[in-house]
Image (spheres, helix red, strand yellow):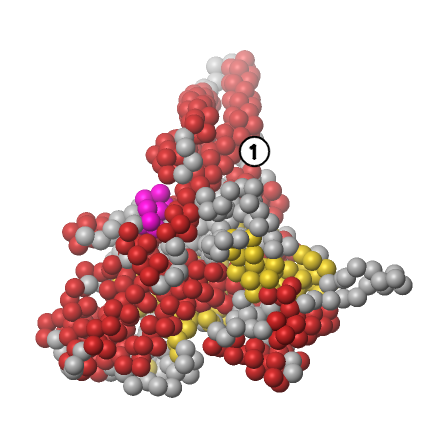
């Protein structure tokens, strides 16, 4: 049995959190830092020096030798540069350990090698990292020893955001300002801050490390580019919430412990739908902290898997034919004194503030559905969205029976007079207690579903940062809140105006509400009739970033400039094209060096076997001959498809970087990859398993 830890004592032990600061910092310094964290006040260098000294002393006690400004550039992963605490040697040969306020609040990593989308020339290397004091520093322990990690924003020499965190913090300020205006209209004079609260459920696959090493496609691209389905997939539904196997339980236990030490509130763990798929969900926290913690969680999932002889796959679709992985982003708005603006209460039809917030969000999502879809655009997500396993690629809002009924009352009469109540759930078994069920069921096919007191955005890819979607949610909410407040503050009769506004928003934006089956083929036709945007691929979605509507939205709240949006669109196109090109080259490499030689060997052995059997006498060799003919036919198809893909890969550099190259990949290379995969997967079902050059799907997902 493994060693058990005291969670209450362990939680946050490697975090420079509020209790550590209160204990170690002088009272005046602590108060000033808290003002900065809570109210956005500027931090003086004098205060920063004291904080830095105490942070360094604490980190050294935790075993840290280096510090790092930990940031999130537009590469899809985090970045860090480690600096030791030591100073230049003194005359006596000794060194001091120091860390100044300047080193705490500002760093200068080389920005030239990070994606900028044309914001800066390659030779312009200067970039700055700035301490995000609202997300606590932490000490991370790994093979490099102890590293003090300081969460930071990353921007260029001229101030443009080069990362995920900077626009997220800007969007949080925007929605805070407008949400405060809104609740003041309803008489709330005590709340000082409204924060987007986020919980990100993380799905992932675990496979055996030795088998992973035998798959070039997994090692180079994170997903299987070839692979025939095993006799059993997920059709029995026996993996979902099933008993967790001991090897996986040991892994999850260590993941939890690592998360808890770093203050990540890992709470719920279970087997997911697909074989070898699992999920880990944390408790809700401020959006920027949630984004940081999710990045830390993904690193922990991978690191701990290696210790257990496994590999953690975070790709959205590592295996064709079984469910892929997402990251459900649960979003709400919460005041500093604990009021959730998305809490309907027991009688939502009477909760006018809630109805205004709700209809504002309906308007925001309807008007910016393309932008919200783009925020979840990812190369891997193209294989997942709309595949009867995840939300469709059409944005809609699920409200449930109770709120849909309230909405219909508002639209038809302008007044809501009642709310549907939950009834008693009777099990029919005397020994089981009856209990009150919710007034509304859930809809797992909806991309944006109201689930009690929050919205669950289910489109985000499993390896993506949650920053992008929360930037969009925060900013579009801020825009509609501002419009509503502008009108209501100028209205002579607030009560009348707010009821009119709720009815107007509900009526004008009811097309975005859909409570039915999002997987049904009829829904796409219905979505077309409603005029909702249908953006099937990442390449289709990227233009949403740079429409005049989006530029106006983001610039009006200081979240992005036009140049920043254009740069992000270019980066997205570049990421797509590079990922597809790598996948195509990997397919060619595997087909050339592994698949074709294996099939040639198999057909040669088969031909020799036929000749040897025939030499014995009049024995029927029709079965062997049929296999030989079929394998040879598929081998020829494989070779033709491989050469066709090779020609397209050779053509790849001739297309200009950006949209043209991405469209070439989407329209020509992707279909050519599918054409190569088809005969190879068919060959896998014929060729002797001992001769097949890589582990099968069955080996990968059922033998963990």
Name the magenta segment's main secondary structure: helix
Q: Nearer the viewer, residue 433 or 670?
A: 670
When asked about the image quadrant of residue 14, the answer is bottom right
Residue 240 seen in the current view: no
Q: Which residues are magenta?
A: 538-546
Q: Is residue 521 above or below residue 606?
A: below
Q: Nearer the viewer, residue 4 or 428?
A: 4
Q: Residue at x 67, y 56 (%)?
A: 82
Element assignment for label 1? loop
Q: Residue at x 41, y 30 (%)?
A: 655
Residue 677, horizontal then vertical, whole percent: 43, 33
Residue 632 seen in the current view: yes
Residue 38, horizontal then vertical, whole percent: 49, 77
When asked about the image quadrant of residue 84, the answer is bottom right
When asked about the image quadrant of residue 189, the answer is bottom left
Quadrant of the snapshot with the N terminus: bottom right
Magenta span contains residue 171? no
Residue 690, horizontal then vertical, whole percent: 57, 34
Residue 454, horizontal then vertical, whole percent: 35, 71
Q: Residue at x 50, y 68 (%)?
A: 289
Magenta span contains residue 541? yes
Q: Nearer the viewer, residue 50 or 513?
A: 50
- Please identify the residue farthest to the right as the structure is shown: 92
Label 1: few (<14), some or many (≥20) within 10 Å? some
Q: Residue at x 65, y 80 (%)?
A: 25
Taking 350 as reference, is 98 left or right? Answer: right
- Please identify the residue farthest to the left as the structure is shown: 413
Taking 394 as reference, is 73 left or right? Answer: right
Q: Which residue is mark 1?
A: 693
Label count reads: 1
């Amino acid at each position: 049995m493994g060693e058990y830890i005291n969670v209450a004592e362990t939680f946050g032990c490697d975090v420079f959190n509020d209790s550590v600061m209160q204990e170690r910092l002088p009272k005046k310094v602590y108060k000033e830092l808290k003002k900065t964290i809570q109210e956005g006040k500027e931090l003086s260098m004098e205060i920063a020096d004291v904080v830095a000294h105490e942070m360094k002393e604490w980190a050294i006690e935790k075993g840290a030798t280096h510090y790092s400004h930990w940031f999130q550039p537009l590469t899809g992963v985090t970045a860090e540069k480690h600096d030791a605490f030591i100073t230049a040697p003194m005359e006596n040969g000794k060194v001091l350990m120091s860390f100044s306020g300047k080193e705490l609040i500002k760093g200068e990593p080389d920005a030239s090698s990070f994606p900028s989308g044309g914001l800066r020339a390659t030779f312009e290397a200067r970039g700055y990292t700035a301490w995000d004091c609202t997300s606590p520093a932490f000490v991370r322990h790994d093979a490099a020893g102890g590293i003090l990690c300081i969460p930071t924003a990353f921007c260029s020499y001229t101030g443009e955001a080069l990362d995920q965190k900077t626009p997220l913090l800007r969007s949080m300020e925007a929605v805070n300002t407008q949400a405060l205006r809104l609740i003041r209209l309803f008489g709330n004079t005590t709340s000082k801050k409204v924060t987007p609260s986020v919980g990100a459920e993380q799905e992932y696959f675990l496979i055996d490390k030795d088998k992973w090493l035998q798959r070039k496609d997994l090692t180079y691209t994170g997903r299987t580019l070839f692979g025939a389905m095993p006799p059993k997939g997920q059709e029995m539904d026996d993996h979902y919430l099933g008993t967790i196997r001991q090897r996986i339980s040991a892994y999850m236990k260590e993941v939890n412990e690592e998360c808890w030490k770093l203050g990540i509130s890992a709470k719920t763990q279970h087997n997911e739908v697909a074989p070898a798929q699992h999920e880990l969900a944390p408790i809700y926290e401020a959006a920027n902290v949630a984004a940081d913690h999710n990045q830390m969680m993904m690193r922990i999932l991978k690191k701990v898997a290696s210790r257990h002889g496994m590999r953690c796959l975070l790709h959205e679709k590592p295996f064709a034919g079984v469910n892929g992985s997402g990251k459900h982003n649960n979003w709400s708005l919460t005041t500093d004194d604990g009021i959730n603006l998305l809490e309907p209460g027991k009688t939502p039809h009477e909760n006018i503030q809630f109805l205004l917030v709700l209809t504002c969000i309906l308007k925001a999502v309807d008007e910016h559905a393309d932008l919200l879809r783009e925020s979840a655009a990812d190369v891997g997500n193209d294989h997942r969205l709309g595949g009867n396993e995840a939300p469709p690629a059409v944005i809609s809002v699920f409200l449930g029976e109770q709120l849909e009924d309230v909405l219909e009352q508002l639209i038809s009469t302008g007044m809501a007079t009642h709310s549907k109540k939950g009834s008693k759930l009777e099990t029919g078994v005397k020994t089981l207690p009856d209990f009150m069920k919710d007034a509304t069921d859930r809809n797992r096919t909806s991309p944006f579903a109201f689930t009690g007191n929050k919205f669950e955005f289910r489109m985000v890819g499993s390896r993506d940062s949650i920053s992008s979607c929360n930037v969009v949610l925060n900013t579009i909410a801020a825009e509609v809140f501002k419009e509503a407040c502008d009108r209501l503050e100028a209205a002579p009769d607030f009560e009348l105006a707010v009821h009119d506004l709720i009815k107007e928003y509900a009526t004008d934006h009811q097309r975005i509400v859909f409570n039915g089956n999002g997987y049904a083929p009829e829904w796409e036709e219905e979505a077309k009739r409603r005029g909702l945007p249908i953006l099937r691929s990442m390449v289709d979605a990227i233009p949403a970033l740079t429409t005049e509507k989006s530029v106006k939205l983001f610039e009006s709240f200081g979240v992005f400039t036009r140049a920043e949006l254009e740069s992000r669109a270019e980066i997205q196109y570049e990421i797509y094209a590079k990922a597809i090109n790598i996948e195509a080259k990997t397919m060619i490499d595997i087909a050339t060096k592994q698949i074709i030689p294996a099939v040639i060997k198999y057909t040669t052995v088969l031909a020799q076997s036929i000749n040897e059997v025939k030499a014995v006498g009049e024995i029927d060799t029709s079965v062997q001959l049929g296999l030989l003919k079929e394998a040879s036919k598929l081998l020829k198809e494989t070779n033709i498809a491989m050469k066709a893909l090779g020609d397209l890969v050779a053509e790849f550099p001739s297309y200009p970087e950006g949209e043209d190259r991405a469209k070439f990949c989407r329209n020509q290379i992707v279909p050519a990859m599918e054409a190569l995969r088809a005969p190879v997967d068919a060959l896998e079902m014929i060729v002797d398993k001992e001769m097949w050059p890589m582990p099968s799907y069955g080996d990968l997902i059922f033998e963990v």
